[in-house]
């Protein structure tokens, strides 16, 4: 899948930088960080749950400011709710309405939709994104546990059936076996499903999934420039350097 010249799903996993700690000033710092490291970044993730204090208009204006400043990069819009480990406190109805406005008013290429949101909301957002030509990253996160292998596979399969373009699961491992479970599930999902997949094991224990995930079939890996968006993330420059080992 080619998005603004970035071929997601071929070659090494593409490096997504998460912009996750926002005021207008920190956004500008992060934008500058990308401009200073242009080859370390493939995709920009706007973690807009950090904008909760802003009005609806100011939120959209800040999203558009980032898009305008980084025109050459594919943009992934993500509003991560508190129940999935983000800062977002919006209700399901507010979540749907915000994502609808972003699809209408912002020039994004990818949108993250939380898979375990109400079914009708997820279906409506997928349908609208497809109409607009925006790729859907269906996601699930658990910052406490890793489900067992069969449950992880079942989630990938359900996400595939519901029409996600990229299926992304991120879990917290208790031990090395949990890390292996997600990597094995990434491998098997990639073999069995038509979709692109991402599997992340968070924290120190899971760091290997961020650099070696591509060996098993992960198409994206998330890093940071100024603030980690999740435990275990690498700076994007370190990610790119480490990915070279697997070329
Ligand atoms: O879902 C993901 C992955 C992530 O949680 C990580 O573990 O790197 C970071 C988030 O910003 C992103 O939306």
Image: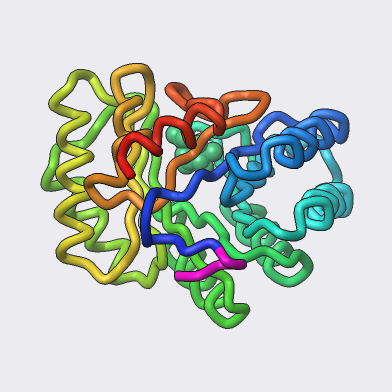
Q: Is residue 168 positioned above or below 178 on the image?
A: below
Q: Is residue 76 left or right of residue 194?
A: right
Q: Is residue 189 left or right of residue 24?
A: left
Q: Percent position (x, y) of residue 76?
A: 60, 55
Q: Percent position (x, y) of residue 158?
A: 26, 62
Q: Is residue 163 magenta?
A: no
Q: Is residue 91 left or right of residue 164?
A: right
Q: Percent position (x, y) of residue 173?
A: 26, 24
Q: Is residue 3 magenta?
A: yes
Can residue 84 be seen at all in this image of the molecule?
no
Which quarter of the rendered picture does the C terminus lie within?
A: top left
Q: Nearer the viewer, residue 72 or 64?
A: 72
| Residue at image coords 71%, 39% | 34
The image quadrant that residue 26 belongs to is top right
| Residue at image coords 86%, 53% | 61
Q: Which residues are magenta?
A: 1-5
Q: Percent position (x, y) of residue 119?
A: 41, 63
Question: Which SS does the magenta portion mostly show?
Answer: loop
Q: Nearer the viewer, residue 70 or 105?
A: 70
The image quadrant that residue 201 belongs to is top left
Q: Nearer the viewer, residue 120 or 41?
A: 41
Numbered marks: total: 0
Which quarter of the rendered picture does the N terminus lie within?
A: bottom left
The image quadrant that residue 211 belongs to is top left
| Residue at image coords 67%, 66% | 100
| Residue at image coords 55%, 40% | 81
């Amino acid at each position: 899948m080619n998005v603004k010249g970035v071929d997601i799903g071929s070659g090494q996993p593409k490096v997504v930088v998460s912009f996750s700690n926002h005021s207008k000033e920190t956004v500008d710092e992060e934008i500058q960080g990308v401009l200073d490291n242009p080859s370390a970044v493939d995709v920009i993730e706007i973690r807009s749950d950090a904008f909760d204090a802003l009005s609806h208009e100011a939120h959209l204006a800040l999203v558009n400011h980032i898009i305008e400043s980084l025109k050459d990069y594919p943009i992934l819009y993500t509003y991560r709710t508190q129940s999935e480990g983000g800062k977002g406190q919006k209700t399901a109805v507010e979540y749907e309405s915000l994502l609808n406005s972003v699809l209408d008013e912002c020039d994004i290429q990818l949108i993250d939709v939380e898979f375990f949101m109400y079914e009708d909301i997820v279906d409506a957002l997928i349908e609208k994104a497809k109409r607009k030509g925006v790729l859907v990253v269906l996601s699930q996160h658990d910052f406490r546990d890793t489900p067992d292998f069969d449950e992880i596979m079942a989630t990938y399969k359900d996400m595939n059936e519901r029409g996600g373009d990229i299926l992304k699961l991120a879990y917290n491992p208790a031990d090395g076996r949990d890390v292996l479970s997600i990597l094995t599930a990434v491998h098997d999902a990639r073999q069995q499903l038509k979709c692109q997949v991402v599997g992340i094991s968070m924290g120190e224990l899971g760091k290997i999934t961020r650099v070696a995930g591509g060996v098993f079939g992960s198409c994206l890996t998330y890093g940071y420039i100024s603030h980690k968006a999740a435990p275990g993330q690498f700076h994007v420059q370190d990610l790119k350097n480490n990915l070279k080992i697997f070329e």
